[in-house]
Image (cartoon, grey):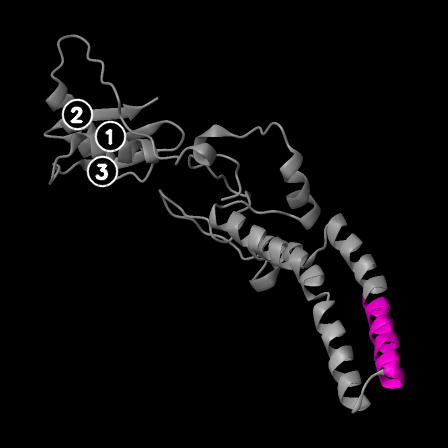
Amino acid sequence: MLTGEAVPQRKLAGDTLHAGTVMQDGSVLLRADAIGKNTTLSRIIQLVRQAQSSKPAIGQLVDKISAIFVPTVVVIALLIASVWYLFGPAPQIVYTLVIATTVLIIACPCALGLATPVAIIAGFGRAAEFGVLVRDADALQRASTLSMLVFDKTGTLTEGKPRVVEIQLFDGADEPSVLRQAAALEQGSGHPLAQAIVARAGLSPLPEIAQFRTIPGQGVSGILDGIPLLLGN
């Protein structure tokens, strides 16, 4: 987690493990350095929540306009009410209240004040559905002016779930036999490439492997039908 890579990363003694990390092979003894809201994952969640309450430049402009617009509307409503009270038909108080209320309702700046926050919250929520975390509202606003985006491909634009598309054989090897051995050997591994090989084989159940072992950073080994097998880089 938080490695920037779509494939599992090897961890050594002393490395940092973030809360939410999934271990695919082996076992680990770790010490908790942070819990609850102090973990990296919790801080990321907190940043997203803070971003939802932030205001972009256009939101600040709307606040400034509202600060002038609201008092102006109230003054206009009072002036019109006074005119109707002094020169309007009887009963003056009824017409005064109706006219003043009408002006306030028509000129209510609710839409002006709510449009920006609602759009921001909706934008953040929609982005989060696609796995995009926006740090502040200004970034979301400026995104509409972008003409070019640069992405990491694997695990970002793609699913990070590789599949076998071609098999090359050497020295007269038989594809079903080779695929059977490879899938049997990889069924004990949680690596994405191992899962792709098992999926390509499509054999159920696969033969059991004896003395299965994961070699960190290199591959896996085991014995099938008395034959030692190595698979990896």
Q: Secondary structure at mark 3?
A: loop
Q: Earlier in the sequence, mark 1 or mark 3?
A: 3
- Label 1: which secondary element: helix
Circle 1 residues within 10 Å: few <14, some 14–19, many ≥20 = many
Identified by mark 2, the residue type is Leu
The furthest residue to the front: 89
Which mark is first along the chain, 2 or 3?
A: 2
Report, in whole angstroms, how far the alpha carbon at label 1 lies from the one at label 3: 9 Å
Q: Which residues are magenta?
A: 70-87
Badge 3 amino acid: Gln
Q: For label 2, count other residues whose C-alpha is less than 10 Å away and answer few (under 14), some (14-19) or many (20+).
A: some
Using the rendered image of the protein, determine whether residue 185 is visible from the camera's viewpoint: no
What is the quadrant of residue 206 in the picture?
A: top left
Could you tell me residue 52's position as x and y percent?
63, 57
Our reading of the magenta stretch's main secondary structure is helix
- Where residue 149 is drawn, which disc sits there? none
Viewer-closest of 70 and 79? 79
Residue behind mark 2: 179
Q: Position of residue 61 (x, y in %)?
A: 79, 53
Question: Could you tell me which secondary element the residue under label 2 belongs to?
Answer: helix
- What residue did someone put label 1 on? 197
